[in-house]
């Protein structure tokens, strides 16, 4: 009997939430456990989490994990050992190339001479069915229990290009929206499978750099941005993918400052990180020679080398440069930060209800993305190792964090985050870890550290909102007092 009790998880037996089942850190960077996806519907987020203190669906599509130290309290004795890498590659080599070829194959778009329309419709249906089946099989290679496939699928680019194929397929699903009847967008099975697969692949730290800074990173971020911009049911999955990638410090700046290509030619997007060399070559060019240039310099597909030049940081040169960066990013309505801002404002009414919705989850995980990119992290992580308290790999300079806070402070995001806390329909006892209210307080706490973003929080009414909860015990009252202290409402004796 004792051995049986030891194998049981008391949190599960007592109907605990996911927060009580998992040792969740402050930041969530892995959220896919889509074993129940086949039974999902358009009205179901397939992701029951700890936002309201209890879970109504135990087969959840959200599995909140953080650092490598975050493991389930219940570890089964028959846990599978990872397969040798050569066996994994041999197994994947027999299936992945054919799956990617099927996913890349598009249905015929024109009626061939002499082909009846009935036969054409049949061939289109067969092609779509095969593509969906291939996406399903590829997704199953990345699910829980087969984590050993995730790194080879992304990093073994000599044999296949999973990220590139999935990014292109995700863009195809958004390009077909114009052909659908107007109204409430429906769940697209292909798009949902693509997003689930990308989420699983973005979890390992080995994959984050290859995905966020690799050859197809521009195409991927563009595809994720298009889904969020269209406010599709899969928006929350795209926000989670962005959240996962920003646990790599080097990926934060390319993500938050993302601006799509101004030429629309499918080339890499532009980054506010304009190098001195490109600016110098432009200024010293012959007078009679014309250039097809733009105010922004090309970012080389968001790769790490676009981040610096000759060992000097290109993101924090002067206040005038910061102002220019904000103007270029915020002046483009298709930039990632503007798209997320509009989505949060549009979906805000869904948070007035206690019923969980895909729109509410999209807001929650977009706020998680904001919390991630505004957190400076510790400076004691060495050699790019993972910080045990935050789950972040690498260090991002405080100057860059301040620039990000300046950028966000010029949007509606601080106002809506304060509003989410102020108008929360849940009592404070239900503000569990990684609930919307908990995430917003964490993001506000990050932004309150900088004078540039303190005024934005004051204008948003943070002082009045947090005054009601600063007396509460626990982390929420502590954060409220810390924010009000930073904003000058409390004496500096706090802490």
Image (cartoon, rainbow, N blue to C red):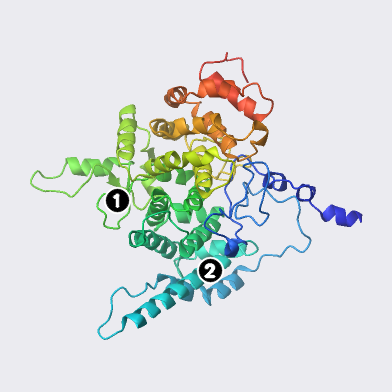
Q: For this view, does 139 lie left or right of residue 11?
A: left
| Residue 208 seen in the figure | yes
Question: Looking at the figure, which quarter contains the C terminus?
Answer: top right
Q: What residue lies at 39% left-to-right and 58% top-to-bottom?
A: 216
* Secondary structure category for the residue under label 2: helix
Q: How many marks?
A: 2
- 450, above or below 48, in the image: above
Say few, some or many: other residues with alpha carbon within 10 Å of mark 1 (under 14 / 14 to 19 / 20 or more). Answer: many
Q: Would you say the residues marked 1 and 2 are in contact, meaning their CB atoms lie under 8 Å apart? A: no
**Residue 59 drawn at (x, y percent):** 66, 57
**Residue 267 drawn at (x, y percent):** 30, 56
What is the number of the mark on residue 136? 2
Label 1 belongs to which residue?
261
**Residue 208 drawn at (x, y percent):** 50, 53
Say few, some or many: other residues with alpha carbon within 10 Å of mark 2 (under 14 / 14 to 19 / 20 or more). Answer: many
Q: Nearer the viewer, residue 179 or 261?
A: 179
Kindly report which numbered mark, 1 or 2, lies closer to the viewer in this rendering: 2
- 312, above or below 125, in the image: above
Q: Nearer the viewer, residue 453 or 91?
A: 453
Q: Quadrant of residue 308?
A: top left
Question: Looking at the figure, which quarter contains the N terminus?
Answer: bottom right
Mark with earlier residue (1, 2): 2
Q: For this view, does 162 lie left or right of residue 292?
A: right
């Amino acid at each position: 009997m004792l051995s049986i009790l030891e194998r049981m998880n008391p949190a599960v037996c007592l109907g605990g939430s996911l927060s009580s089942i998992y040792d969740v850190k402050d930041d969530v960077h892995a959220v896919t456990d889509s074993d129940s996806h086949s039974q999902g519907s358009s009205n179901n987020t397939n992701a029951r989490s700890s936002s309201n203190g209890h879970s109504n669906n135990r087969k959840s599509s959200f599995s909140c994990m953080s650092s490598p130290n975050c493991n389930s309290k219940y570890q089964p004795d028959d846990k599978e050992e990872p397969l040798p890498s050569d066996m994994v590659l041999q197994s994947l080599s027999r299936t992945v190339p054919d799956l990617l070829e099927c996913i890349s194959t598009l249905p015929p778009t024109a009626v061939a001479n002499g082909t009846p329309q009935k036969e054409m419709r049949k061939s289109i249906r067969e092609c779509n069915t095969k593509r969906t089946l291939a996406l399903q099989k590829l997704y199953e290679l990345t699910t829980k229990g087969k984590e050993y496939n995730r790194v080879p699928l992304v990093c073994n680019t000599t044999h296949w290009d999973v990220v590139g194929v999935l990014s292109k397929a995700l863009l195809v699903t958004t390009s077909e929206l114009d052909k659908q009847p107007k109204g409430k967008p429906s769940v697209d099975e292909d798009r949902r499978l693509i997003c689930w697969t990308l989420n699983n692949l973005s979890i390992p730290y080995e994959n984050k750099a290859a995905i966020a800074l690799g050859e197809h990173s521009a195409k991927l971020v563009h595809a994720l941005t298009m889904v969020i911009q269209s406010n599709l049911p899969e928006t929350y999955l795209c926000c989670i993918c962005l959240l996962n990638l920003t646990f790599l410090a080097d990926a934060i700046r390319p993500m938050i400052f993302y601006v799509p290509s101004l030429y629309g030619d499918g080339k890499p997007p532009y980054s506010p990180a304009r190098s001195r060399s490109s600016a110098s070559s432009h200024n010293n060019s012959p007078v009679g020679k014309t250039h097809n240039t733009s105010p922004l310099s090309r970012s080389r597909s968001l790769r790490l080398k676009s981040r610096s030049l000759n060992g000097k940081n290109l993101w924090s040169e002067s206040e005038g440069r910061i102002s220019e960066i904000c103007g270029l990013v915020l002046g483009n309505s298709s930039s990632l930060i503007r798209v997320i801002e509009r989505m949060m404002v549009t979906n805000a009414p869904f948070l007035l209800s206690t019923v969980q919705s895909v729109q509410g989850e999209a807001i929650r995980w977009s706020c998680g993305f904001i919390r991630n990119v505004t957190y400076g992290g510790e400076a004691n992580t060495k050699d790019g190792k993972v910080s045990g308290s935050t789950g972040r790999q690498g260090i991002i300079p405080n100057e860059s964090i301040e620039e990000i806070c300046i950028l966000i402070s010029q949007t509606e995001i601080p106002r809506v985050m304060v509003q989410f806390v102020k108008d929360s329909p849940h009592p404070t006892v239900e503000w569990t870890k990684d609930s919307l209210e908990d995430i917003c307080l964490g993001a506000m706490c990050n932004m309150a550290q900088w004078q540039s973003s303190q005024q934005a929080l004051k204008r948003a009414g943070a002082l009045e909102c947090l005054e009601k909860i600063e007396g509460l015990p626990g982390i929420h009252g502590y954060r409220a007092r810390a924010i009000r202290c930073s904003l000058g409402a409390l004496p500096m004796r706090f802490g």
